Amino acid sequence: MPDWYAATRIVEGMAPEFEEKFHLYSEAATAWMTRIAGVLGRSYRVKDSTNFILVSSSPGETMEQELTMMEQLLDIVFQSLDGAGRSFHGKMPVVLFDDHQKFREYLAQSDQQENGGTISSVYIETWYPQIVIYAPQGTDLRHILLYEICNTMLAPLTLPAWIASALRQEIEHFAGSVPPYELSARWVAQHRAYWTPERTAAFWTGESFGSQDEGGELSKHLAQFLLRGLFQETTQEERAAFLDAASPTDGGRRAAEDVLGVSLDEALEHFLKG
């Protein structure tokens, strides 16, 4: 792996403008990925697009299609986040394996573990992050790429679990990966029957999202309800400021009051009591 801290000192001294820095970091990342492709074997090659560098053994035409998909998904995520989240240092490396053993060896060298399943992906968070995916050839990568690009964009934001969940769902809705959000009488009745003070406290800390009962699904739905209500009649700047200020220590409640003038506790109580 390149010494990115040394590279930073050089780039920051050479390139004062963002576009110049992006270009220089991208060149360094492309050289890095080219070396990795050489180590992986002759079947692996490197192609890039405006924002991504792809290492894969797929045919060239397939790689072009995958890069186009990544750019489209990145646009969706950018639009959904209203300018919040990460600005890339340079082009984002994506290493795509169809050989499970090579995938595992690559992760081991990066001190990472796979997350299991027929398809597996890992977002490696370093100063210059990368996305690593194992998927047999012919796999539809849209959902997994969307998930990992979300990880990439949300990683710099230390968000409460409910906000991170709501943002992911909004992005997935926008991308057409899941059905649109609905708030039916059935959902309202389920929420009002489920949320006790103890369970509500677990929602703010994020613990409820791991519930094995209906609480996990209700947490995800409640997160969307709250964020949608919170962001009504707000500007892009206000939304970005809230996301930047929201802290997991209080579930984002202080940021909601300070930035948007809204009490999340009162909003939730009003919803649950009707």
Image (spheres, rainbow, N blue to C red):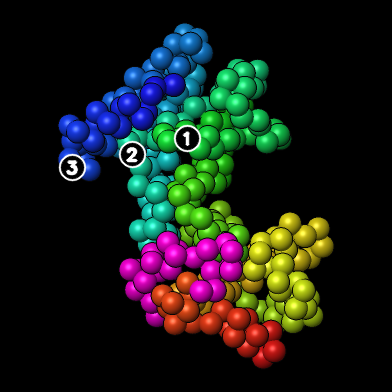
Which residue is identified by label 2? 89
Residue type at mark 1 is Thr
Residue bounds of the magenta highlight: 233-254
Q: Residues within 10 Å of mark 2 (few under 14, many from 20)?
A: some
Residue type at mark 2 is His
On the image, the x and y values in percent for residue 148 come to 52, 43
Q: Residues within 10 Å of mark 3 (few under 14, many from 20)?
A: few
Out of 212 and 201, give the one closest to the viewer.
Answer: 201
Out of 214 and 177, give the one closest to the viewer.
Answer: 214
Prevalent SS, magenta region: helix
Q: Are marks 2 and 1 in contact (CB under 8 Å)?
A: no
Residue 228 vertical placement versus 74 (above, below)? below
> Which residue: 62% across, 22% down?
108
Residue 17, numbered label: 3
Q: Residue furthest top?
A: 42
Residue 263 vertical placement versus 75 (above, below)? below
Q: Judging from the image, what secondary structure is the residue with disc 2 in?
A: loop
Which residue is identified by label 1? 126
- The Cα atoms of the two marked residues, 2 and 3, are separated by 12 Å
Residue 83 vertical placement versus 11 (above, below)? below
Residue 173 visible in the snapshot? no
Q: Earlier in the sequence, mark 1 or mark 3?
A: 3
- The Cα atoms of the two marked residues, 2 and 1, are separated by 12 Å
Residue 136 visible in the snapshot? yes
On the image, the x and y values in percent for residue 49 come to 33, 33
Out of 34 and 158, give the one closest to the viewer.
Answer: 158
On the image, the x and y values in percent for residue 244 come to 42, 61
Magenta span contains residue 236: yes
Q: Which quarter of the image is occupied by the C terminus? A: bottom right
Task: Determine which quarter of the picture holds residue 105.
Answer: top right
